[in-house]
Image: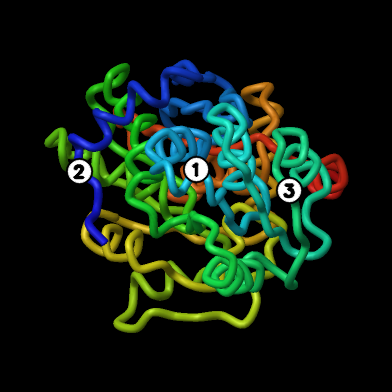
Amino acid sequence: MIPPTLDDVLAARERVYRHMRPSALLNHPTLDAWVGGRVLVKHENHNPTGAFKIRGGLNLVALLTDDERKQGVIAASTGNHGQSLALACKLHGVRCRIVVPVGNNPEKSAAMRAFGAELVEHGRDFDEAREFVERLSAEDGWRYVHNANEPLLLAGVGTYALEIFDVEPAVDYLFVPIGGGSGAAACGIVRTGLGKRTRIVGVQAKQADAFARSWRGGDRVVHERAETFAEGIATRVTFDLTFSLLKDSLDEVVTLDEDELRGGVAAAIRCTHNLAEGAGAAALAAARQFGVPDRATAVCVLSGGNADLRTLRDTLA
């Protein structure tokens, strides 16, 4: 598996921008006060599916071979990856099947169906759904799209990092949530390719910190459970492509408890007037915990805004 390069990200822009615009990079003064430093928010929640992953789906599906288009696409997802593929497949006339965990976020499931995906429920969490998909795709011949081990996804996702540096060339810290790691890995590719000195800080939930433990230690950790309400970062394992990239490019990783993650969701609403899911607001909470030095500029990637009403009520309570 060959990792994407900056040239791959640059080439992806044309395929991504056929169907969406660059997302906003905005400063919110009350958020600066809450964090304790200057913060710019990359509003990936404003994208067509409400999350950053649509960029990867648009790039990958546009480059499917004729045989892959005939076979159709299959993936495991709790929501944002699935919505990305569902919408991209709809735009390109490709059949899409998504496997979600039993009891998945009902509003994300409804959105995937609305974009035209066929949904199957299996497993207690994302990783069990993913393992089922890997068996099913081998049997049925569908084009399996992994949420992280896909160079074309990373190249598409990296377009948001290009947008950040186009608007703000001198970024000191870039806070990015890590589930599968595609967003943070893509930011590393762009940062290094452009020759920037930005420090990239990954964000995980303390109750789903397999990546953080693996990155800090000598062995790759596998957890039995990922018990966080922030389903976008609720992974129990690491993935080969993104882990290898992040082992080299990531500068630090911050882990947050559930109350801190909830605090990020509340801050997004109160300070930016934007709805953020738990994973989407994780970067805001991490910047507050990490601390942004005086005269430094930090960018927080608000990676998704697809919070369901049940989770939002529980979070804000």
Between the residue at mark 1 and the residue at mark 3, the CA separation in whole angstroms equals 16 Å
Between the residue at mark 1 and the residue at mark 2, the CA separation in whole angstroms equals 25 Å
Secondary structure state at the residue bearing disc 1 = helix
| Residue 150 shown left or right of residue 43 in the figure | left
Q: Is residue 46 above or below residue 277?
A: above
Residue farthest left in this picture? 195
Could you tell me the amino acid type at mark 2?
Answer: Thr
Residue marked by disc 1: 69
Task: Determine which of the numbered discs, if any, sits on residue 5 in the image.
Answer: 2
Q: Are marks 3 and 2 in contact (CB under 8 Å)?
A: no
Please state the total of marks drawn on the protein image.
Answer: 3
Secondary structure state at the residue bearing disc 3 = strand
Tell me the mark number nearer the camera, choosing from 3 and 2: 3
Secondary structure state at the residue bearing disc 2 = loop
Q: Is residue 305 above or below residue 70?
A: above
Between the residue at mark 3 and the residue at mark 2, the CA separation in whole angstroms equals 33 Å
The spot of residue 138 in percent (x, y) is 52, 70
Whether residue 291 is visible here, answered yes or no, is: no
Q: Nearer the viewer, residue 72 or 125?
A: 72
| Residue 57 shown left or right of residue 305 in the figure | left
Structural crowding at the residue carrying mark 2, measured as other residues with C-alpha within 10 Å and reported as few (<14), some (14–19) or many (≥20): some
| Residue 66 shown left or right of residue 234 in the figure | left
Could you tell me the amino acid type at mark 3?
Answer: Glu
Structural crowding at the residue carrying mark 3, measured as other residues with C-alpha within 10 Å and reported as few (<14), some (14–19) or many (≥20): some
Task: Determine which of the numbered discs, if any, sits on residue 91 in the image.
Answer: none
| Residue 26 shown left or right of residue 312 in the figure | left
Mark 1 vs 2, N-terminal side: 2
Residue marked by disc 3: 118
Whether residue 296 is visible here, answered yes or no, is: yes
**Going 68% across and 22% down the picture, which residue do you hit?**
273
**Going 15% across and 33% down the picture, which residue do you hit?**
194
